[in-house]
Amino acid sequence: MKFHKLISVILHPIVIPTIGVLLFLSIIPHEVKKERQYLLISIVFFSTYIIPLISLIILKSLGFINSFQAESIKERKIPLFIMLLIFYLLGRNLINIPDFKELGMLFFGTNFSLALVYLLFSAQIKSSLHIMSLSSTLGFFLIYGNLYSIPTLPITIVIIILTGILASSRLHLKAHNHKEIYLGFFIGLIGQFIASSML
């Protein structure tokens, strides 16, 4: 049980964007000054980890959510809306920076996925945000590698393995059922393909 909880924490949706940026910087074909890399990592970490974490603390203290897991669809709406806004702003700003414009696709793609998850809430359909975050990152590296002829196979293999481990952990913890896991996976991929076709 402890292992499954640890995996869920390490690969939490608010951690994945920073991991995605670090992986991107490890394979980017052109030279980027270290100062700019550190600034990018800091901005992404603050925006996608610190702000959502503070938001959850505030929402819990105000009684909008019962726990930090935000298990019900009702409890997930406000945190998800905050993430939609953050990812849109990051995507819009990064796409205008020559060194990091490809990362704009990562954030826009994840934003499309989050929007799909939010729309499904109206039909009372829940999906795994943990799996969606990883599959969105997977979709980005598949598309990025194909567009720019960059070898991303090692990264995609690692992401696929981590997705399998995470899916198993989420099922073991009874946080999701099989349908919600598969739905999260496909929504994450779809969002990236929508973004790549529009950008």
Image: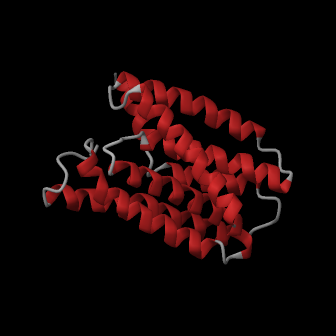
Q: Quadrant of the C terminus?
A: bottom right
Relative horizontal placement of residue 187, taking residue 122 as reference (left or right): right
* Residue nearest the viewer, comparing 172 with 38: 172
Q: How is the image coloured?
A: secondary structure
Residue at horizontal 68 percent and vertical 76 percent from the top? 97
| Quadrant in the picture for residue 18 | bottom right
Provide residue 141's location: percent of width, then percent of height: 70, 48
Residue placed furthest toward the front: 123
Is residue 11 something that shows in the picture?
no
Relative horizontal placement of residue 46, taking residue 101 as reference (left or right): left
**158 up-or-down from 37: above or below:** above
Residue at horizontal 55 percent and vertical 46 percent from the top? 188
* Residue nearest the viewer, comparing 101 with 11: 101
**168 up-or-down from 144: above or below:** above
Provide residue 77's location: percent of width, then percent of height: 30, 55
Provide residue 32's location: percent of width, then percent of height: 75, 68
| Quadrant in the picture for residue 28 | bottom right
In this rendering, the count of numbered labels is 0
Residue at horizontal 57 percent and vertical 42 percent from the top? 135
Relative horizontal placement of residue 50, taking residue 143 as reference (left or right): left
Residue at horizontal 70 percent and vertical 64 percent from the top? 102
Is residue 170 something that shows in the picture?
yes
Provide residue 34's location: percent of width, then percent of height: 69, 67
Q: Quadrant of the N terminus?
A: top left
